[in-house]
Structure formats: structure tokens, C-alpha cells
Image (spheres, grey):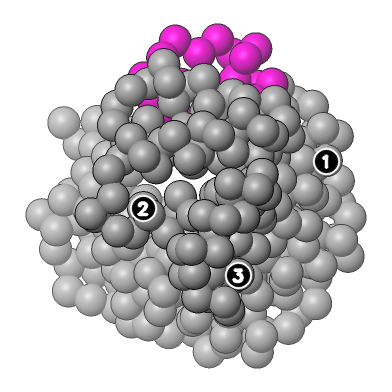
Amino acid sequence: MRILSILLFFIYIYGNDIKSYKRACSAGIMNQCVLLGMTYENDKRVDKNRIKDIYKKSCEYGSVEGCDRLGYIYAKESKLNKAYKYYKIACDRGNSSSCYSLLKLKSEYGNLKLKDKVELLKKSCGYVADMACVEIGTFYLDKNDTNRAKEYFKKACKFGNSIGCFGVGSLYEEKNNTKEAEKYYKKSCEMGYSNACVSLADYYVKFKKDIKNSLKLYENTCDKKNGEGCANLGLLYKFGNCVKKDQKKALYYFEKSCKYGFGVGCFASAYYYEQGIGVKKETKKAIKLYKKACKLGLEKACNKIKKRK
């Protein structure tokens, strides 16, 4: 895909000079063949088979981008065996993006063994297919191999993946390395991953007693519909943790949290309506909220409903 970006850049800078592409392609300059094919792809008048022939030529003469484009076209046409073939050629030649495309295609339409999936994920992990690094990191995390998980999360983070940075931060926090945890949470948060912003805010509350920054982060994540951020805001106001205790504000944020699909927020809201804390007691509403929390996977909410029966 990096090659594709470079080729697109040349098209943008120098224009679609089809004649020069043709001459260069005929002379054996394969990147010009790919440029020619890409230019034709945007021209509905050009026969698809002609475009495939151009890509086949470039693929046969070593252009991984030509092989990748062929795989892409055959995948769109649902000619899966041919798509597999050309994605695999490009993958075997070191194109991580093609490996990831092959992985996704086989995962969706084929019988992909776990061992083969892991190998493809490792090959896919790269600048373009950074989510592959996250996926293989998650695989190792599920196997309790935290060292390998961290290795791949770090790669993902290096390639600009916010979830990867968050994964590294979480692993450092588990090892009580709060300084490194803060570093990676902050990096992930700055990339726009709201869960990392919540974790960073938690860090400020627990270790720095920096309520000003934690409140700002919780408010920002809540505004971005992150239920956990809203719930944590609610908890601060419920207990008066470095802010003035305010049960109405607490309920307001718990209800927002529930609205955004966070079970703890639903449970807390249900409790407030059940007990009449800062609001008129409403048993029916409380039961409805407990049920929602249960559906969202909160076991204590499910137990609460069972006890009422």
C-alpha cells in the first residue's frame, strides 16, 4: 500500500499521461504499468480484461502492487480462488497489506485454520495493516503471553494505531509501571481513542490527584458518547471525590452512561431511582434499568432482578 500511495502521488503530480505510461510499460517499467492500470480503472470505457492483462504483466515481472491490484479486482468479482492466488503472491513477496487482504478474505469465505491465521497476521502486521498487529497482540494476550502481546501492541502503536498504544499502556499498568502506562495512555488518547482517555483520567485521579485534568478528560470522553467516561464522572459527584458532592449531577451522568450502553451506568441509575436518591422514587423505572444493565452483561444486575421475582 505504501507503493500504491507513491503511485497515486505521481498521478497527482504529473497527471494521467496515458501515452507515456503505455510507452514506459511497453519498455518494461512495471510501476508505469501499474499506473496505467490504475488510470484505466477510473475510465469506465476501458474493458476490465485489458486492465487485468496489464496487472498480470506487471505481476509476472515482479510488481507486488500489480499482483495486489489483481487480487483486489478478482475479490470484487467474487472470483475467490484467483483473488487468493494473487494476494498470496504479493503477500509472499513481502506486501503486508496483501497478506491482510488475504486473511480477511479467507476468514470470511474460507476455512482458515488457527495456525494459518496466526501466520498471516504476523505477515500482515505493518505500517498499512496496523490492525493486524493489534489482532495478533490480542491473540497472545488471550494466551497469557504478555511479552509477545506487548511486542505486537508496541508495533501497532509505532505504526500509529491508537488501540495498540492503549494495549501497551494497559499491560504496563498491570505491572504497576504507572509512568510507562501514563505515557502510552496519553499517546493513545491524543490519537483520539476515548477508552485511553478514560484510563488516563483514572490515572490522574489515582496517582496524581489531578482532578482538573481528570474532569476535563472524563467530560470530553462523555461528550464523545463513551459510557465509561460518563459513569466515572457520576462516581466523582456521587462520592464527592475532590469535587462537591452532587447527587443530581451524579444521576445525570449515570443516565448518560446508560444511554451510551455502559452497564454500570444503568445499574447506578436504577439504584438511584429505587432508593429515591436526588430524584423521586420510581420502582418500575428502576427495574427497567436493572434489566438493561443485565442485558449489557452486568451480572449483579441480573442477580438483582432474580431476587425480585
241 to the left or right of 247: right
* Residue contact between numbered discs 3 and 1, judged by CB atoms under 8 Å: no
Q: Is residue 214 visible?
A: yes
Label disc, if present, on residue 151 of the rendered structure = 1
What amino acid is found at the position of numbered circle 3 in the picture?
A: Phe
> Where is residue 53 drawn, in percent x and y?
44, 34
- Cα–Cα gap, marks 1 and 2: 39 Å
Give me the disc on residue 24. none
Tell me which corner region of the image, top left, top right, bottom left or bottom right, holds residue 52: top left
Determine whether 237 is above or below 40 in the image: below
* Of callouts 2 and 3, the N-terminal one: 3
Q: Residue at x 72, y 71 (%)?
A: 186
- For residue 277, what is the image quadrant? bottom left
Answer with mark 1 or mark 2, whichever residue precedes in sequence. 2
Residue occupied by mark 2: 41
Q: CA distance from mark 2 to mark 3?
A: 16 Å
Q: Nearer the viewer, residue 21 or 305?
A: 21
Which quadrant of the figure contains the C terminus? top left
Which range of residues does the magenta coloring cover? 103-120
